[in-house]
Structure formats: structure tokens, C-alpha cells
Amino acid sequence: MARFLSLIVLLLASALANEFSNKPEESEFRREMLTNLNKTNEKLDQLMRIVLNQPVEMRKLVEEQNDKLIKSADQRFNQLFRIRFSSKCNLARLSNLTLLSNGKMYSFHPTAATWNSANETCSKKGLHLATIKDQNDAQVVAAEGRRLDEGNTWWVSAKNLESEKDFRWQDGTKLELDSPLWTDGAGKTDDCVRIYNWAKGKLSSAKCSAYWYFICELPSECY
């Protein structure tokens, strides 16, 4: 019974994945999922051999639990596939993205805009304003910014959400007030955050209505 149900899941997964096998990265995703399903199938076979030696009541209970697990795995597979190859991610991949040495992809916009306008532009492309979580990200992004325009600064996704200087990145992660990412002497009195090309990519607050260049980033779920 478990073997039969597992094979159904495997066939459904294969059929679904075949619809998206045109792109190399999608074929790789399909292969990974099928490999994982095969491993799960082998474990189910082992368990079923044990179950067959148990009383009928126990076998029935195990089969019911197995049905639930297979349905849950199938739902999870479909969820992952929808996220990985959603229309939003497909739209995002059409942007002029640059892969940097930190493994992330960005779209640099050397056009002055307010923070809100920049944020909206990124969102319409299936992207979000760049999130700088550590000094490596900061240095890598700033180096590319210097290459494109030596003397400018760029909007990033951090913004003060409350009146008490509660700066947050687009994913909700807190940008601490004492973070080494801030430039020395940064007042943090304004609500939006920009990154300098110079000084190894230090951050500073600025009025959201100011006009600066901006950097969009490919969402993590689209890689």
C-alpha cells in the first residue's frame, strides 16, 4: 500500500516537474526533488516490511499515518514548486541583475528617486530594495556602486518604522542602532537608510523624500 501510494506521488511529481523542465535551474530542482522522493520511497519500503509482520490493527494504523505523510509531502512539494517558479520570481529574473561575489543578485539603478518611489519600482519588478545584513554585503555592494558611480549613495531597504528609531530591513530584521554597519557619527535622526559608495559601504539615515540612486535585490526564494 505504501509503495503504491509513494509511486503515485513520484509520478505526480515527475509529471508536474516535466512542465517546467525547459530551464536548466528548473531541471536541477526537479532532479533534486525526485532524488529526495526516491530516498523517502526506500525508507517506506523498509518500514512496510516491518509493518507486514505486525497485527492487522497495527498495519491499518500505520497505513493511515502513511497516507497523511504522503499527502503532506505532496502539498509541500507543490508549495515549494509554486514559490520557486512563481510569476513574481519569473518577473524578477527578467530584470537586469548582477551577480556579486557574496552570491546575491542585484539591480543597480543610477537614477535619483525618493525612498518610497525606489521601493515601489523594485516591487513592480518582483524585487525588493537591497538588504545589507553584514559587512561583507556592504563592502561588495559598495564596490559595485563605486564602479558605476564613484561619488553617489544608494537607497537600501532599511527604514525606521516607529518614532523610537526602530530601523528594520524589508524582511523585518532589526538594524541595531549600535551596528558597525552605520557610518561613524551617523545621527540616525531620519527615517530611511542609504549606503555610501565610499568608506566601505557604511550606512546613514536620510530623509525619505530625498533623491538618491537605489539598489534592488532578488528575493531569496527566487534563487
Image (cartoon, rainbow, N blue to C red):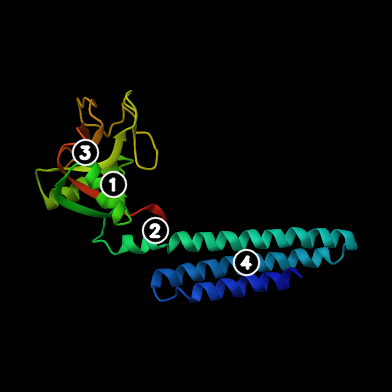
In the image, is 132 to the left or to the right of 153? right
The local secondary structure at tag 2 comes to: helix
Q: Identity of the amino acid at label 2? A: Cys
List x then y, in percent, for residue 120. Answer: 27, 48
Does the CB distance between marks 2 and 4 fall below 8 Å?
Answer: no
Q: CA distance from mark 2 to mark 3?
A: 24 Å
The residue where tag 1 is placed is 130
Q: Identity of the amino acid at label 1? A: Ala
Of badges 3 and 4, the one in the foreground is: 3
Q: Identity of the amino acid at label 3? A: Arg
For marks 2 and 3 on the same chain, the one whose residue lies earlier in the sequence: 3
Quadrant the N terminus occupies = bottom right
Q: CA distance from mark 1 to mark 2?
A: 14 Å
Does the CB distance between marks 3 and 4 fall below 8 Å?
Answer: no
The residue where tag 2 is placed is 222
The local secondary structure at tag 4 comes to: helix
For marks 2 and 4 on the same chain, the one whose residue lies earlier in the sequence: 4
